[in-house]
Image (spheres, rainbow, N blue to C red):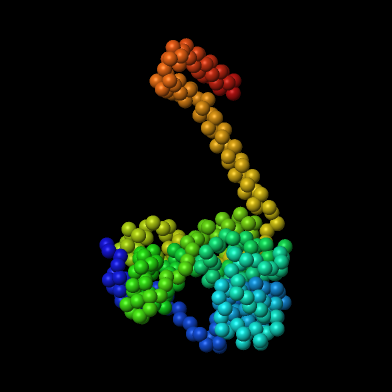
Amino acid sequence: MKYDIHLFEQLNEEYRSTPVSSFTWSTDSDSLFKRGRSMLARLSKMVSLEGMRVLDVGCGRGYLSAVLAGEHSCSVTGIDIEEREEWDSLRGSYPDLHYRVLDLSRDNPFEPASFDLIVSFVTWEHVIHPFTMLKQCNELLTPSGQMYLDVNPYRSPTGSHQVKDVFFPFPHLLFGDEVFVEYHTKHTGKPGEPARLNKLTYSHYREYFRVLGLEIEHEHLRKIPLDREFYDRFKDKLELYPVFDLELNGFAFLLRKGKGASLSSTRNRQQRGSTMIEDEVQAVRNSFSYRLGNMLVEAVAVPGRNTVMLPYRLLRLGILGLTEATRRHHLDDRS
């Protein structure tokens, strides 16, 4: 099958009336405030938000930050990699609301333990250095601080982040970036760009939390049942990924800063693993078959004394092997 713009257009027409996501949003201030409240609804049932020092990572237009400051009396700092025009009017309405242009994975101007709560909605999948960013956030939490991450992962049906224009599932797993550019150029007159996405999976996030000592207090998985007909139709591409990842359209974690030294524990486990590997290698080198093979190779590769001594060395190796086998036999009988 040729994964070109013609197939892309065909699939988009097939799914236009039944898009993989029917989510729509407006950009007026009332709608954005409402969306901010909706995004905080789940979190507010698990965490008392009142009066907390909050960092909003990937704050976007800044309305969720404003809801935290205006309706929950929080001291809020919203950060994003580019400034938004709404920031000026919002920060003027709430004295404890601040915005900064900042990539936390590259620059961390905050003191350690500056925040009681860090929140991030549909941002982490866009971060180029996600582990570094997570590590920085971990350091910014107070000893009992919490972090809430809501993620739309790369392998999900809507992981392309282009559901407003692309209606069929998994376009980013089927088509190269150049097809997206060609499609947008043809249909909008602008080349557009595929969303900048890292490819972390649910399992990657859980491993990062373990390494950093972040304890999972709650998690919520959002799934879209796999369209089996679509999957079978494009199995050559989609069977490269676990079905669990293909059905997982999003997930959210409430994390608490852990008390253990997880990085030290990880290093210790790595050292123990290295020791085990060294022991296994040494056991192989001590084995009868390895030593026999080594003698024969030496006799062929470096003739002379090695060739003359070969019968004696083989006899000695056989006696040692017989002695070792007899010793093991006696040990087995005694046990």
On the image, the x and y values in percent for residue 108 come to 65, 66
Q: Is residue 251 in view from this perspective?
A: no
- Does residue 7 appear in this view? yes
Picture coordinates of residue 223, whole percent (x, y): 47, 67
The residue sitting at 37% across, 71% down in the picture is 180
Count how many numbered circles sit on residues in the image: 0
Identity of the residue drawn at 56% across and 88% down:
30
The residue located at (72%, 62%) in the rendering is 143
Horizontally, residue 27 falls left or right of residue 56, namely left
- 158 lies left or right of 231: right
Q: Quadrant of the N terminus?
A: bottom left
Quadrant housing residue 57: bottom right
The percent position of residue 185, horizontal first and vertical second, equals: 35, 76
Q: Position of residue 98 (x, y in %)?
A: 66, 79
Q: Write the residue at 52% across / 16% down.
A: 320
User: Which image quarter is the C terminus in?
Assistant: top right
